[in-house]
Every structure is written in structure tokens, then in C-alpha cells.
Image (tube, rainbow, N blue to C red):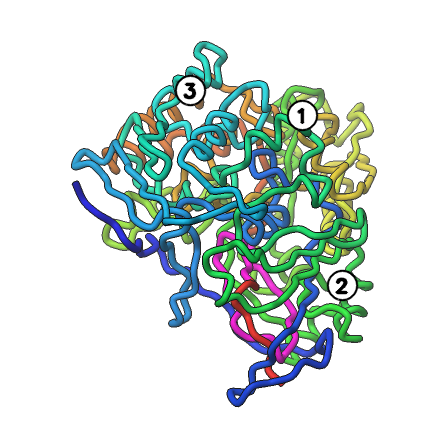
Amino acid sequence: MKKFLILALAFCLVFSLAACGGGDTEEPAGDESGAAEGFSITVCFASEPQTIDPALNSAVDGAIMLQHLFEGLIKWVDNGEGNATLAPGQAETWDVSEDGMVYTFHLREGITWSDGEPVTAQDFVYSWQRLVNPETAADYNYMIDMVAGANEIMAGEADPSTLGVAALDESTLEVTLTYACPFFEEIVAFPATFPVRQDVIEANGDQWTFDPATYVSNGPYTMTEWEHNSYILMEKNPNHYDVDNLGPDSIRFALMDDANAMLAGFNSGELDFIQQVPVDEIPALTEQGVLVVDDYVGTYYVCFQNQLEPFNDARVREAFSLVIDRNYIIDQITRTGEVAATAFVPSGVYDAEGADGDDFRTVGGDYYSTAAEDYEANCERARELLAEAGYPNGEGFPLVEYLYNTDDRHRAIGEALQNMWQTELGVTVTMANQDWAVFLQVRKDGDYSIARNGWIADYNDPISFLDMWMTGGGNNDAQYSNAEYDALITEAKSTSVPEDRMAAMHAAEDIIIGQDHALAPIYYYKNYHLMNESLQGMYYTPLGYYFFGYSSMAE
């Protein structure tokens, strides 16, 4: 057995401590080091979250909140040297069998829920069984499909009690896998695997997350108020084992979707941190040096509803993708260092577990050219494809709608796409925007023609970008289905041999992007933010998580 106390992350995750303009939320007292005591902060990422149930959330803003409210067996910490890394969370230590297929987690002594009840190994058993139970309908149920029995349970062929997780006693959890998963430690730091309380959920049903009185959590902070469409207030959890080391007394998550209002709130000192700014303000904020750009492992893309006309034709999907001028979008609209996408899996994701520094994108290559000199040839080919599909010069093409969530940047990108499709293909595309939570549900239901989309790595492995597109997958918003693709993903997820895994995943990407053109990748993400210049100690991972719980406020 190999014992792990602290794990080094498989790839370097840079966190940000850069200073930006803004004001304190209050006037706190300081100690001799200059750090303020007894302070609160207000941050803003998005509007009303669709859910803050760990098993049901599938959005980054919700995940950031959950990383403060809950804690998994393993957690992300600041190593003090500019990197975020994995470290013991609710589990103080864990053992891994020699074949890498059995993990035994030893929980910390005395850990409790926010109401003072003890956290036990059985809480994790219940939570993981709930995650894969078809009745839960969790989009991320496949996140633990490497656990023995998970696939059979998700298919409705076995009872959730057969999942390969067992409480050996109150403080010992045993997890049995079907293969030695190279990224399993990152999985148990992911929100979908966080524990939830069985008695609370059974007593309150789907409503358990809406009332602070029933929202029992086990993380460093606990929710004390939720003023819907206004804010979620979190305060230090007095029962958390590390409460004495926490920074802010409270963290208020303001719920807003207007970038102009966010910037105004930041400039007035109402907000200490924002992640959205008006697109026309980006050049000035960049020139002032106050807009901080963060690494981000993700892809911004157009999602076609593959099952509905006219986008059930791969030729139509490819034509719409080829006429996208990706360089215009990153140079004239986003302007924060994004890279034009030539595939779906972005740069920065390891190939063969990072052997010899290989990158999945470098090995896999490009599926189309984004060179400026090739754009007209791309457009000409797109027109040929549209004609082959029965729509020469766009004649007879039905009116379709582009759906996006309310946001200044998404609107600007949508208008650019609308113009490109009309100018180069002769088709008419209307636009519609929706509030964040509504947009997520409509897209999930497949009730659209074209929609803006984005995907951020849940862990550093190409499968995080590819397994979501299996037939019937909870995050398969494109309603994509290809039996050959499914077989390749299943193959990649059933072997521990790095070369075999990567070969299957490259072949799968060849199908979904190179052959079926199910999606139209636009650019590889960069994150950015503005932060109060007095706020220190926030750390970040390129998976999109910002952590404020151990921050401090200088005088």
C-alpha cells in the first residue's frame, strides 16, 4: 500500500494575487502586520445560480460557491509559492493499493457538519450513491464512472447500493475502481463528489438548498442568507476544523448579470471582485494594468442542436463553423489573450499523462486553419457544403435563432457570428438572450437551434472534454449521438495504459470535430478579473475556481 499525505497537482496551477482598483467594504482595524481583522468582502461572478446542490450543479459560478460551502475528501490549497495544489480535506490521509484500484480514505478526527453533527464515511457513501442514482438526474453522474458498479447503476441495471464505496467504520471510506484512474485524486476534489446529508435531503426534498436553516454543509463557510436574484451571504462555519485560520468573516456573492453595473459597483467600492466587464472597457482596463488575466483550461464554442433540422446535417454544421472568423472575435471583441480554437480539446491538456511534455492539442493537430490568409478559402468551402446540403447561396434555409445568456461579451460575439453567417452563407440568424439559470435549462433540454457554450476542464485530462458527448450524457447539450464515438470513449475509460487511452481519445475527437462537426470551437479561454487592491491571499486554479476563504484585507 502507498500512503499519500499531500498530492502534487499533475499540472501547474497558477493563482493570482495581483492588485486592482476598488474599495473596502468596511473600515476594519489592522494588526502590526498591516492585515485587517474582522472584515467582509463582496464578490460577483454571475446572476442567480441554477442550483447549489453539489450533485446537480454543472456551472463554474456554482462550483466556486460550493468550494467555499463544502469540502471533499481532498481539497485545493494555496502552497504559498504561486501554485494551487491538492491536499488533505475531509480525509487526513489515504492509501492506494499497488494496482491503483482501491483507495482507502481516513477521515479527520472530529470533523462535523455546520450544525455540529459528525461527518462520517457513510455520508460519502450516501452522496456518491445519490450522484449515480438515475432518480437524481445529475448531469455529472459520469464523474465517478470509474467506480465499480457506477455504469450499471446509471443505466438502471443495478441498485445504487452496489456502488463500489463502503464505510469500513465511521471514519474509513473504501473506494474500489474498475481501472487505475490517473486523475482520481482530482475527482474527489470536484464538487459533485462532496458529501451531503441524507436526513436533510430526505426531510426537505429538492427544496433543501433554498433555506439557510436546511442548507447543512461541511465547508469553511456556511450560507446564512439567500436573497434571490440579489445575493448569497456566507459566514465562517464555526464548526469547521480550520475556522481559526480563515480570513473574511463573511463573503457576499452578489448576483448580477449586467457587466456595466458590475464595473460601476467595483469602482464605487461596493464590489471587491468582479469577473465580467463591458467589452468596450477592456482596452482601457488593460492599458491601466488593472485587468488581471488568468490561465484557464477551457474552450468557448457554438453548440448546434444535432437532432433538429437544419443542424442534423453535418454539412450544415461544418459550413457554419468554417465561416467563423475566429481571429476577428479574439482580436476585436474578447481582447484578453484568447487563442483561436482549431479543435475542441484546448492547449494545456496533457497527452499520455504529460510524458515528455506532450500536449494533447500538439499531438492531435488542427482540424481547420485559422490563418487569416485561409479564411476566404474556408468560406468558399462552406458555401459548397451548404449547396450540397440543399441550400445554394442560403436559398431555402430556414430562419434559425442563436441563443445566449445575458452578458455584454456573449452579445457582442453573437452579433459578430450573426453577421458572418449572413454575409458569407446568405442565411438569416436571429438572436435571443435569457437569464443565466433559464438559459442553462433551455440549452440542457435541447430547446434551441444554435447556442453559445463553453467548457472548462474539471481535471487535467482530455477525457474531461470528450466523455460529456456520449449518447445521453447529462452535459451533452448538443444532443450528439454516434455509436463509434461512444465505443472509443468507453475504451479510453476502461484502460490504464496511457498510450491506449490517448489513441482512443484522439480517434474520438477525429469523429466529433473532424467528421461530424458537432460543435464549432471558437477560442481557448482566458479568465480575467478586477480585484480590490487591498484584498490579498486569493488563490486560483485554471479549472476556474477562485478561493477567498484564506484572504486578508490590508489597511
Helix, strand or loop at disc 2?
loop
CA gap between label 3 and label 1 equals 30 Å
The relative height of residue 96 versus residue 46 in the rendered view (above or below) is above
Q: Nearer the viewer, mark 1 or mark 2?
A: 2
Answer with left or right where residue 346 lies relative to residue 24: left
The stretch of residues the image draws in magenta is: 525-547
Question: Mark 3 belongs to which amino acid?
Answer: Asn
Residue 395 image-quadrant placement:
top right
CA gap between label 1 and label 2 equals 32 Å
The relative height of residue 293 versus residue 240 in the rendered view (above or below) is below
Residue corresponding to mark 1 = 311
Answer with left or right where residue 209 lies relative to residue 346: right
CA gap between label 2 and label 3 equals 44 Å
The answer to which of 29 and 507 lies nearer the viewer is 29
Question: Mark 2 belongs to which amino acid?
Answer: Pro
Helix, strand or loop at disc 1?
loop
For disc 3, the neighbor class at 10 Å (few under 14, some 14 to 19, many from 20) is: some
Q: Residue at x 63, y 62 (%)?
A: 331
Answer with left or right where residue 547 lies relative to residue 334: left
Q: From the top left corner, tell me how far across and down residue 408 is, in percent.
A: 77, 56
Residue corresponding to mark 3 = 151
The answer to whether residue 369 is seen in the rendering is no
| The C terminus - image quarter | bottom right
Residue 137 image-quadrant placement:
top right
Residue corresponding to mark 2 = 278
Q: From the top left corner, tell me how far across and down residue 281 is, in percent.
A: 74, 69
Residue 162 image-quadrant placement:
top left
Q: Residue at x 42, y 15 (%)?
A: 152
